[in-house]
Image: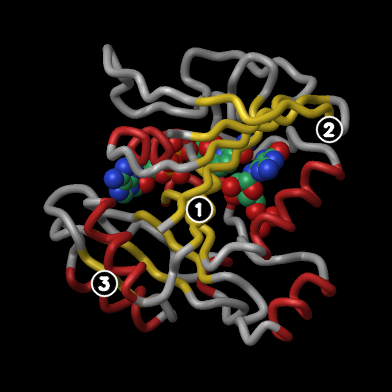
């Protein structure tokens, strides 16, 4: 599986505010690039923190891109994947609408009645790990179901875990023209943080996009 992490951050490295409210950091050209990245992917993944904060749809906006997917024998939209150890995703979340297939990754800590409710709401549940989703095992199960190219949109806790598990192949960050600030505002990689053995990145390219900068890294 090839894993591409993409996120937008403020000039001071924040993904959103201390209140975890969604902020439009990208401009129109960057949102269009993100839409193209989604269209090229077999699945788009976020953590449940992002679902609770943003209620995203994670679908492809552009009609022509959806049509090209259809012509290639693919579903209109990539599958959606939510990392949600205890099943906190609301049953009326937009990621559960019928526009795409949705996989909910859970752990043994998930209450069985929540698992039944979310399955009834349309998610396909994949369980791996005891207290938290064991990402290598869960993503291997998805690879067996044909997901080869995975785009991860965040948030910071999930992105950290993917780096910690050495599962990231590419990282794209759009750095936008705003300062958000705040000790508690989410950053690109939160979780416990690294104290050594930092994941090393290799700079691929840097480009001006909208009023910010797109930085692309490979993770060798
Ligand atoms: N600017 C941007 O590009 C983006 C911004 N955001 C922002 O990020 C914030 C949400 O980020 P976070 O709170 O960090 O939540 P998150 O979206 O990273 O979800 C974290 C949750 O995922 C679940 N999870 C299950 N297995 C896990 C594992 N192995 N590792 C880590 N988490 C696992 C846990 O319940 C955990 O609390 C929101 O404020 C949202 O607006 C989110 C995505 C992109
Ligand atoms: N690329 C990008 N730029 C920003 O400025 C953002 N705030 C985000 N957020 C991510 O996009 C998701 C929204 O998806 P839908 O448009 O609702 O499908 C959101 O959940 C974040 O993952 N991304």
Which residue is painted at 78% across and 70% down in the image?
65
Q: Nearer the viewer, residue 203 or 30?
A: 203
Q: Nearer the N terminus, badge 3 or badge 1? A: 1
The residue singled out by tag 2 in the image is 209
The residue lying at 76 percent from left, 49 percent from top is 33
Quarter that holds the N terminus:
bottom left
Question: Is the CB atom of the residue marked by disc 1 within 8 angstroms of ligand 1's nearest atom?
Answer: yes
Residue at mark 3? 115
Front label number (1 vs 2): 2
Of labels 2 and 3, earlier in sequence is 3
Question: What residue do we see at 52% from left, 25% from top?
Answer: 202
Residue at numbered disc 1: 51
Residue 126, compared with residue 194, is above or below; it is below
Q: Is there a contact, CB below 8 Å, between mark 3 and mark 1?
A: no
Check contact, mark 2 vs mark 3: CB within 8 A. no
Left or right position of 130 against 16: left
Disc 3 crowd rating (10 Å Cα; few below 14, some 14-19, many 20+) is many
The quadrant the C terminus occupies is: top left
Residue occupying the point 69% across, 29% down: 205
Callout 3: SS: helix
Q: Residues within 10 Å of mark 1 (few under 14, many from 20)?
A: many
């Amino acid at each position: 599986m090839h894993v591409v992490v993409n996120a937008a951050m403020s000039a001071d490295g924040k993904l959103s505010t201390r209140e975890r409210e969604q902020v439009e950091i990208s401009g129109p050209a960057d949102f269009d690039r993100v839409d193209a990245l989604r269209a090229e992917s077999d699945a788009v993944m976020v953590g449940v923190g992002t679902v609770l904060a943003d209620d995203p749809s994670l679908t492809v906006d552009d009609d022509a891109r959806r049509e090209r997917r259809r012509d290639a024998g693919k579903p209109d939209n990539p599958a959606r994947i939510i990392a949600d150890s205890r099943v906190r995703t609301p049953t009326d979340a937009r990621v559960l609408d019928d526009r795409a297939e949705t996989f909910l990754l859970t752990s043994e800590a998930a209450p069985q009645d929540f698992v039944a409710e979310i399955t009834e709401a349309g998610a396909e549940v994949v369980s791996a790990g005891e207290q938290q989703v064991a990402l290598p095992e869960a993503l291997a199960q998805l690879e067996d179901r044909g997901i080869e190219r995975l785009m991860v949109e965040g948030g910071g806790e999930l992105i950290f875990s993917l780096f910690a598990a050495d599962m990231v192949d590419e990282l794209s960050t759009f750095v936008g023209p705003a300062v958000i600030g705040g000790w508690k505002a989410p950053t690109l990689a939160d979780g416990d943080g690294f104290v050594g053995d930092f994941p090393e990145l290799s700079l691929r390219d840097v480009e001006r996009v909208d009023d910010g900068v797109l930085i692309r890294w490979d993770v060798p």
